[in-house]
Amino acid sequence: SGKDHVLILMIGTLPDDIAGNESYMMEITAEGTTITASQEQGLFYGVMSFIGLLDTSSSRGTMPVKETTIYDKPRFEYRGHQIDSARHFRTKESVLQTIDAMALYKLNNLHFGLSNDEGWRLEIPGLEELTTVGSRRCFDMSEMTCILTQLGSGPDPSDVPQFYSVADFVEILKYAEARNVKIAPEFNMPGHARAAVVSMEARAKNGDDSYRLMDPEDETELLTVQFYDRSSIINPCLDSSVKFVVKLVDEVVKMYAEAQLGVDVWQFGGDEAKNILLGGGYSNYDDLPKEPPFSKSPACIKKMQEDPTISIDTDAANYWALKVNQILAQKGIREMVAWEDGLNGMTKEEFEIAEVSVNFWSTLFWGATDVLVEASKTGFGVIMANPDYLYFDFPYEVHPEERGYYWGTRENSVYKVFSFAPENLPQNAETSVDRDGNAMDVTTPVWPAPIIKGIQGQTWSETVRTETQHQEMTFPRVLAVAERAWHRGSWELDWTPNQNYQGTTNHVPKDQLAADFKGFNSVLGCREVRKIWQRLGISYRVPPPGAMIEGGILIANTELPCTRIQYSVDRGANWSEYFGSVEVGEGKYVSLKSV
């Protein structure tokens, strides 16, 4: 009609069936759109949904929308994404871009990995070595100026700082808060802590051992999952280790306060604090040292003698989790989150803090269903973070030219992420295969359905070195996570004790799943990926085309709708647009590419 379309935002009462802080109601008429919510978060997500209805790539000057009424509420309270900035540093600009995308697709929690064995990425005033040493990688055998080079970082340190200053972090916090994204900083401990341990060793060698994280008299020999020695694990028996955490928490709390925020969530880490030589894979190697962590640490031996109820050598992560939890409770932090194995054998009642959650990262083919049942008995909130569906450092498809790890799965395609049923884990055995491409056979335990707090995608960065690689491994898969986090598909079945799922069963209504994915994928390819590229400047993975030649006719397609395909019959000297089946002749060498 040529008239302006008016957008009205109202705080009001919602129907009981969608009531909630993040819920909203949207009414679109020819005159305008009214969004009603009971809280500002709901209004925000209503606006994001309204933007989602628009074709922002349109060049017509107008963006038509259909008259409709929408009642909407989120499926999960926790809808997350993880960035691993420790292994390879992600720039501040990249983090801000990711937050923009999270807000657009209603993801509300950023799990921000700021430390690991391979790097420390946040400036901590008063502990300068964490960044002057721990954020730098180079070939210095003394590790007084940097930690040793690894993950392809080369012999010399980067000329560009590989950490966030206090000002950077405060800016990120403010930026996220304005977009309804909470940031949970992760400082992994006691394991995966080599950057911190080495940094504090350098400080000790310079005369101040008051924050030392390694017992200099400990002679324990061990090997961690990523093949480090005891310098990878914080010694939980040292008073200086406790002092380090108190200092760390104090400084981070100050940064949040500068951003006019409180620290709602602290990610403890806790995973893989163990000696893998004690595991079954090394049972036949009797000549290797089979020593529990800290079993030869005088400080730990003394502590266990003083209190026989403590078994630090076998439960280092559990012991340290309680120590850190006490510090967090004293600082008024409401929730602690850990990787699930870091709290194995523990329950919510052991903790002082108000809320404790775990990132659940067991794989289905290694028995995740039984592990999930045990986790549901602990009282912890459960956030699904399963590697075989939600890790984005794995390949998109099974092909030697696809980049990524493969220890948890050979592929995590957009379809596989989309088809993940987080509230009925056994169901996934019917719709996917195991790491080796074999059918799975999973029977639902006789136990009530575990309560799932949320779902989270992970972009680990051991093999993800550049910003472009980071974006293309994350996008568009993270949009499938956002879909599952906000909406339960009609094809997702309820948890049913004794129900068996395998590749040959037909419990899942696959026609509904196929139709649902077709609609999602069409919007993804024809509208959303263009939006994140054109409006947010985020690269995304463009899938290669598939093709065959039959009777001299080239037939090609692509898994992402609206992706252009070009072909060449002269080995790339000239390219033609592919619009449909085209004659190229028998015996021709044809090259294709997606653009």
Image (tube, rainbow, N blue to C red):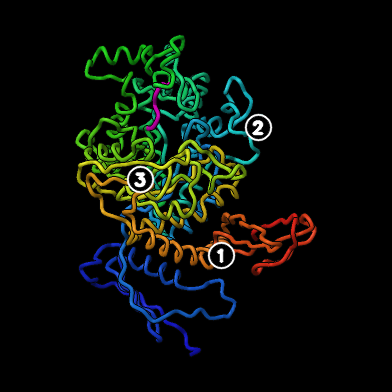
Asked if the residue under mark 3 is in contact with the one under mark 2, i.e. CB atoms within 8 Å, the reply is no
Q: Which of the two discs, 2 and 3, labels the residue nearer the N terminus?
A: 2
Q: Which of the two discs, 2 and 1, labels the residue nearer the N terminus?
A: 2
Amino acid type at circle 3 is: Gln
- Measured along the vertical axis of the image, is residue 56 above or below residue 567? below
Circle 1 SS class: helix
Q: Please rate how many residues cluster around mark 3, counting C-alpha atoms within 10 Å: few if below 14, some from 14 to 19, many from 20.
A: many
Q: Please rate how many residues cluster around mark 1, counting C-alpha atoms within 10 Å: few if below 14, some from 14 to 19, many from 20.
A: many
Asked whether the viewer can see residue 278, the reply is yes
Identify the magenta region.
Answer: 271-276
Q: Which of the two discs, 1 and 3, labels the residue nearer the N terminus?
A: 3
- Measured along the vertical axis of the image, is residue 60 above or below residue 135? below
Q: Which mark is residue 154?
A: 2
Circle 3 SS class: strand
Q: Where residue 568 sits in the image (x, y, percent)?
A: 74, 60
Disc 2 to disc 1, C-alpha distance:
35 Å
Q: Please rate how many residues cluster around mark 2, counting C-alpha atoms within 10 Å: few if below 14, some from 14 to 19, many from 20.
A: few
Residue at 38 percent across and 13 percent down: it is 297
Which residue reaches farthest front? 551
Overall secondary structure of the magenta section:
loop
Residue at 50 percent across and 66 percent down: it is 522
Q: Quadrant of the C terminus?
A: bottom right
Circle 2 SS class: loop
Amino acid type at circle 2 is: Gly
The residue mark sitting in front, 2 or 3, is: 3
Asked whether the viewer can see residue 258, the reply is no
Q: Which mark is residue 530?
A: 1
Disc 1 to disc 3, C-alpha distance:
37 Å
Q: What residue is disc 3 on?
A: 502
Amino acid type at circle 1 is: Arg
Q: Where residue 336 sits in the image (x, y, percent)?
A: 31, 40
Asked if the residue under mark 1 is in contact with the one under mark 2, i.e. CB atoms within 8 Å, the reply is no
